[in-house]
Image (cartoon, rainbow, N blue to C red):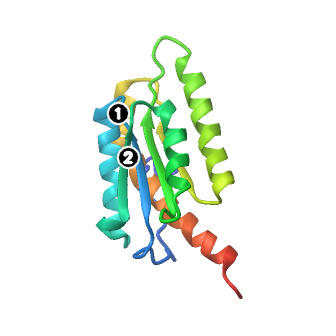
Amino acid sequence: MATAAKSLSVFSTNDLPDVSERRFAILVSEWNSEVTEALFEGAHQTLLQYGAKAENVVRGNVPGSYELTLGAQWFAQRDDIDAVIALGCVIQGETKHNDYINHAVAQGLTNVGLKTGKPVIFGVLTPNDQQQALDRAGGKHGNKGDEAAITAIKMIGLQEQVYSKF
C-alpha cells in the first residue's frame, strides 16, 4: 500500500466506512515483543483514530507468530468480531525457520479469512534483522500495525459494498 512513499504509515483514507459499531480482534505474538508491542500500539491507535470504540477492540496474545493462525480462527468464529488483525515478527536469522513459519502463517490466515468470510489481516513482519523490524514498527518506515488496521477498516468497507442492497 505504501511502497512508493517508503513508509508503511502513508495510505489513502478516502471513503473509509463507519466502524464505530464494528468489533476488532488484534492478535499479538509475544515473540519479538519489542517489535510486536509497537505494532499493536500502531494498530490500536489507528483503529481508534478512524472511528473504532476502545471497548470494541479486543486483544489476544499468542506465544509466537505460528500460533496466530489458530488464534485468528478462534476470534473470527465469534459472531461479535467483524475483523481480525494478526501481528507478529519473524526475523530471518541463520536458519530457514522463517520460511516455514511465514509461509504457514500466511497460508493459515488466508484460509481463516476464506473459511469465515471475515477480514483476517496479515500484519506479520518478515525482516532480515532486528533493525529492519524496528524500522517497520514505528521507525523510519512507519508502522505496519497502522497499515494492518487501515486494511481491516477498508476490507469491512468492501464487505459492506459487496453485500449491500443496491
Which SS class for mark 2? Answer: strand
Residue at 62% x, 31% y: name it. 103
Task: Tell me residue 161's x, y (percent).
Answer: 64, 77
Q: Is residue 71 left or right of residue 60?
A: right
Which SS class for mark 1? Answer: loop
Query: Which quadrant of the view contains residue 19?
Result: bottom left
The answer to whether residue 122 is seen in the rendering is: no
Q: Can you say whether 2 is above or below 97 in the image?
A: below
Residue at 45% x, 54% y: name it. 147
Residue at 40% x, 49% y: name it. 145
Mark 2 crowdedness (10 Å alpha carbons): few <14, some 14-19, many ≥20: some
Task: Tell me residue 63's x, y (percent).
Answer: 39, 31
Q: In the rendered view of the protein, which quadrant contains the N terminus?
A: bottom right
Q: Which of 72 and 79 is in front in this view?
A: 79
Q: Is residue 138 left or right of residue 94?
A: left
Viewer-nearest of labels 1 and 2? 2
- View extreme (bottom): residue: 166
Q: Which amino acid does label 2 sit on?
A: Gly
List the residue tagged with mark 1.
30
Disc 1/disc 2 C-alpha distance (Å): 10 Å
Q: Nearer the viewer, residue 136 or 36?
A: 36
Q: Is residue 152 left or right of residue 36?
A: right
List the residue tagged with mark 2.
60
